[in-house]
Image (cartoon, rainbow, N blue to C red):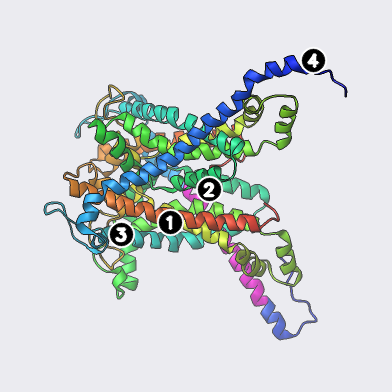
């Protein structure tokens, strides 16, 4: 093409003023992307500096002391850490089998139509605000626990230290159950995706060898997707650790360390929710901020693990997605 | 499946074993169905309880009147509904533009290192417990201004909304086929022109869905508001005042020992859940089928 140079000249002159626009757009959007990093950095910085009085006064003893006395300015987070671990463990014990079972049903058995309809409902369950779970639990689960479930557990397993003491209804167990319901949706939808990304050939090979549907699912498909399922469990766990409202409403808010699951307890998020607004004095407030800091690092660590595991499986599986 | 049905030629021990395998197969598969049924039925249990307990208290008074002191029956949660709207409006006003522009950067301008870091930090921020976000907002807004305020609540909620909005925007922009970018660039459009008039419009349904789902998520949050916007028994007079919100009202009313407050809490729960579910269903079915929030 022999285009005369003279024709290009006016064109490029017209293009010139616009040349900067791309760079400007890039710079503007980049500022906002960096702003997200800034928010995260500021979050860590503020939690760190605002917990300084407590960190300096108690050191690592903060994590192992069970003393919580605002009057004498003595603070230890052990009862809250213990309560958070107990309730989250209970929640996982209930929600992992149920969630993974439901995910297997959705990915392996249900017809695609039914599967997507049920998944839609599961996603809606994930959207229910936590205060609604709390509202429901306080008026239905707690009386149910007090009058039926806890007495029955005491009658059947009362010889174990796990099921002793009065049945208040409000308990570690009630908090664990409500947390289980709240973590189902995450475990189900992430596990389902992990199972769906297992290549079809894996299933066909197992079935062709004479395996039953269950054997192919349990011995081939589930092990293939195990990292993704583990990721979903970590994701659910991170939610359970940080969940505030529903737990605060049913755990009874009593800072003790009890072996019994029927006892009143306290968790890290609930103590912040209950005491932060009224906390007076630098040490008191910073002790609560330090609990927030511990909670922050704990959930960040577990979430980070979950992300890596989920990333690994979705990369590996390339069959149907 | 009938793949493992015993054939008549097999020895007796083999058929017994196969029968066991089949029984296990049927039992376990049924069990997974039961798991799915239990988990999905939770949604209906929640809805049914809220409608049963709160249905009769949702009336005009509920939407227009102030909460009454204990002992007097009647009253409503007009101030909490208005307060929630105010807080959510300002949270959206901050969160959506910031998240959207960051998402555009992640999808369209990103190189290698920075977008990876931003993406990862978004996912981590998304997983930070909401109570910790509330604490952060208290430290950076409430403490310096010496006052609980609707603005502080909006800041807390916007911090939760930003990562959701950014990741949703990025995800739906990524779904726009590259051929559209190339076609636009080949026609001589500059990059930002391509983004503004080709790519974003192509992804607008998905992005809108993501934004609505994100706003619905923060609308139900209680923990970040507990010590930012606090609560208020009266109509709030401005952004700088403590402001009532529906989720916090549900919390305080449900944990108080008065039957009349409990009735109001049920009604408020029904209204809140209704709004959240309607927003979710509308966004997912009408605007963009099968979309979901980044986990």
Element class at badge 1: helix
Q: Position of residue A51 (x, y in %)?
A: 26, 49
- The subunit letter for the residue under badge 3 reads A
Left or right position of A25 against B270: right
Q: Position of residue B26 (x, y in %)?
A: 63, 67
Q: Is residue A66 visible?
A: yes
Which one is closest to the eye, mark 1 or mark 3?
1
In the picture of the structure, the residue carrying the numbered disc 4 is: A6
Q: CA distance from mark 2 to mark 4?
A: 65 Å
Which disc number belongs to residue A122?
2
Q: Residue at x 37, y 42 (%)?
A: A42
Q: Which residues are magenta?
A: B19-44
In the picture of the structure, the residue carrying the numbered disc 3 is: A81
Q: Residue at x 70, y 71 (%)?
A: A211
Q: CA distance from mark 2 to mark 3?
A: 30 Å
The image quarter in which residue B31 lies:
bottom right
Q: CA distance from mark 3 to mark 4?
A: 77 Å
Would residue B37 be counted in the magenta stretch? yes
- The subunit letter for the residue under badge 2 reads A
Q: CA distance from mark 2 to mark 1?
A: 26 Å
Q: CA distance from mark 1 to mark 3?
A: 16 Å
């Amino acid at each position: 093409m022999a285009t005369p140079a003279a024709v290009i000249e006016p064109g490029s002159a017209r293009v010139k003023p616009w040349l900067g626009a791309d760079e400007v757009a890039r710079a503007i959007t980049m500022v906002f992307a960096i702003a997200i990093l800034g928010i995260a950095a500021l979050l860590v910085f503020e939690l760190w500096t605002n917990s300084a009085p407590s960190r300096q006064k108690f050191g690592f003893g903060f994590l192992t002391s069970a003393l919580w006395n605002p009057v004498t300015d003595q603070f230890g987070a052990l009862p809250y850490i213990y309560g958070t671990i107990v309730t989250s463990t209970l929640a996982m014990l209930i929600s992992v089998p149920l969630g993974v079972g439901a995910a297997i049903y959705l990915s392996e058995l249900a017809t695609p139509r039914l599967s997507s309809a049920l998944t839609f409902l599961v996603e809606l369950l994930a959207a229910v605000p936590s205060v609604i779970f709390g509202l429901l639990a306080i008026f239905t689960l707690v009386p149910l626990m007090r009058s039926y479930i806890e007495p029955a557990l005491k009658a059947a397993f009362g010889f174990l230290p796990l099921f002793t003491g009065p049945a208040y209804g409000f308990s570690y167990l009630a908090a664990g159950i409500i947390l289980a319901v709240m973590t189902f949706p995450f475990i189900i939808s992430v596990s389902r995706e992990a199972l769906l990304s297992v290549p079809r050939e894996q299933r066909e090979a197992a079935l062709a060898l004479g395996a039953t549907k269950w054997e192919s699912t349990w011995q081939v498909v589930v092990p293939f997707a195990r990292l993704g399922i583990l990721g979903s469990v970590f994701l659910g766990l991170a939610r359970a650790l940080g969940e505030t409202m529903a737990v605060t409403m049913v755990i009874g808010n009593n800072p003790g360390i009890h072996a019994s699951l029927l006892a009143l307890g306290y968790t890290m998020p609930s103590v912040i929710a209950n005491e932060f607004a009224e906390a007076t004095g630098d040490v008191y407030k910073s002790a609560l901020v330090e609990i927030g800091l511990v909670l922050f690092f704990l959930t960040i660590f577990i979430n980070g693990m979950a992300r890596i595991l989920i990333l690994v499986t979705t990369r590996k599986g390339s069959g149907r997605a | 499946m009938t793949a493992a049905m015993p054939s008549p030629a097999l020895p007796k021990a083999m058929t017994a074993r196969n029968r066991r395998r089949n029984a296990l197969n049927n039992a376990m598969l049924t069990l997974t169905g039961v798991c799915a049924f239990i988990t999905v039925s939770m949604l209906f249990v929640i809805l049914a309880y809220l409608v049963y307990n709160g249905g009769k208290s949702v009336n005009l008074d509920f939407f227009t009147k102030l909460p009454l002191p204990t002992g007097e029956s009647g009253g409503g949660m007009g101030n909490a509904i208005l307060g929630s709207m105010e807080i959510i409006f300002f949270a959206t006003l901050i969160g959506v533009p910031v998240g959207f522009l960051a998402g555009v950067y992640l999808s369209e301008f990103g190189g290698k290192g920075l977008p990876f870091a931003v993406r990862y930090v978004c996912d981590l921020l998304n997983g930070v417990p909401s109570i910790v976000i509330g604490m952060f907002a208290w430290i950076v807004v409430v403490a310096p201004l010496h006052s609980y305020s609707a603005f502080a609540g909006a800041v807390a909620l916007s911090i939760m909304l930003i990562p959701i909005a950014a990741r949703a925007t990025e995800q739906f922009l990524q779904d726009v086929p590259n051929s559209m970018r190339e076609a636009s660039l080949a026609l001589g459009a500059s990059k930002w022109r391509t983004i503004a008039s080709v790519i974003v419009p192509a992804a607008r349904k998905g992005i809108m869905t993501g934004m609505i789902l994100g706003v619905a998520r923060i609308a139900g949050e209680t923990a970040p508001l507990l010590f930012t916007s606090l609560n208020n028994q009266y109509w709030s007079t401005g952004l700088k005042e403590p402001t009532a919100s529906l989720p916090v009202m549900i919390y305080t009313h449900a944990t108080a020992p008065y039957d009349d407050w409990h009735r109001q809490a049920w009604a408020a729960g029904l209204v809140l859940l209704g709004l959240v579910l309607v927003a979710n269903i509308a966004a997912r079915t009408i605007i963009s089928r099968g979309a979901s929030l980044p986990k």
